[in-house]
Amino acid sequence: LGAVEVMLAVEPGLDMGLPVEAATRVWAALLTFVLGGMVWGGMQLVSKAGLFFATIVGLTLLSYYAGLIAAPLPGVSPAVTGLSTATLSKNWGPSYTDGVTFSDVLSVFFPCFTGILSGANRANFLKTPEVSIPWGTLAAISISFVMYASYMIMWGAVADREYLKNGPSAYYYAESNRRRLLAGSAGDSMGVVSEIAWPLALPTQIGIIIASLSQALQCLISAPGVLNAIAVDGTVPFLTKAAFVDKRGEPVAALAATVTFCVCASMIGSLDLVAPLLSICFLAAYSALNFSTFALGLTKAPSWRPTWRYFHWSVGLFGFLLCTTLAFIIRWYFALVAVAMLAALVAYIESAQVRVDWGSALGGIRLDLATAAMLDLAHERKHSSNWRPQLLCLPSWPGVVGGVGTNEAASNPVFPAKG
């Protein structure tokens, strides 16, 4: 959806005479099928395309950095001040457009960070996943944080706030120390790109489209693999059909389900509307992942043996609380629906009595609580009020054989010997 919105902004003629939302749906579905076909073609084809996409994305990022450093370029709006601490100071505080809140901005921005787990989702393609996953994930987080933070600071320091929000087609005048919009179209983000990007705007705009498609391609690579792995494990019985693979070992059933779901989501027709749903889905997955590591680490489950020496269960607890909090900040009602669906899924798995070769976090919690309770009983002072007698029924008293009792049996007042 992000790629399509930029496409239609750069070249309005691509709307094919349809309304913007309808054209967005058509192009989004078409591009999803194309990317799905690339993934179906195999990892070799995707790897070659991935190198091309990565090159374009890198050049696009460099174009932005160069343009921000070189600003203002000749002929641009006077609102572009160039990198200035004074401009940064004016733009530092929040000032949202009418109808836009912090949760809206967070929901749109959060999916940008979800690509950092692409390596973990494709662990079966890594030569040494136990080494590549932790170091690769930390490197991706660090690089992404530095890149996004630097962009935010540089964009905030390069031009007037209203220019960045409304584009170069808006003109302003000062009156009573207030800025008022006189003319122009709001939200002309492509106009801002045209005046800031260096050396040319069009390659940068194409780079934005390719970067969006690259992120979508990464999702179409990792999501079917994860879905196929869940189906093969048999953890969720109704997903077993997604375990089917073709002769090349490609998870075609999981890929078909993923493409179908993506096409249905793209029918919403707006990135701003899809972003909260997407963010909640990612946060729900991350919350479950963090809770599992927290529970397994806290209970010291024998099946949980992380090789990362710096792991502590408190990190998992912090991640779980943070992800859950962010989900409720973005859309509290969507977060409640996600919690209900996760609870229903856990209840379904528990009722299905699925047999797997590994333990669960909930099983580890139960075993830890039961063990702790039994150990505490050994140190607890007994009291008759807590005693619950259990009756044991015996078919005959020990010592009674064939109705003839021994001396011990004969002296027993409960089962006297006969004979």
Image (cartoon, rainbow, N blue to C red):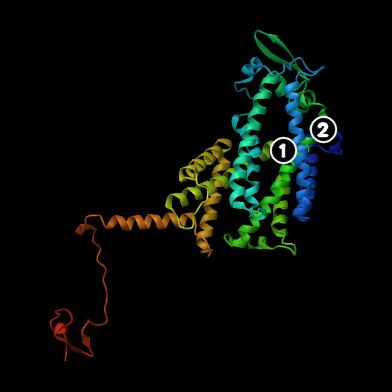
Residue at 71% over, 55% down? 255
Choose between 229 and 170: the one closer to the eye.
229
Query: Which amino acid lies under the numbered mark 1 shown in the image of this protein?
Result: Ser
Instruction: Categorize mark 1 by other alpha carbons within 10 Å: few (<14), some (14-19), many (20+).
Output: some
Farthest residue to the top: give it.
Answer: 176
How far apart marks 2 and 1 lie (CA) works out to: 24 Å
Residue 156 visible at all: yes
Q: Which mark is residue 365?
A: none
Q: Could you tell me which secondary element the residue under label 1 belongs to?
A: loop
| Residue carrying label 1 | 270
Q: What is the secondary structure assignment of the residue under circle 2?
A: helix
Q: Which callout, 2 or 1, points at the residue further toward the start of the chain?
A: 2
Q: Residue 91's quadrant in the figure?
A: top right
Name the quadrant of the N terminus: top right
Q: Badge 2 is on which residue?
A: 203
Q: Which amino acid type is marked by label 2?
A: Pro
x, y percentage for residue 318?
49, 40
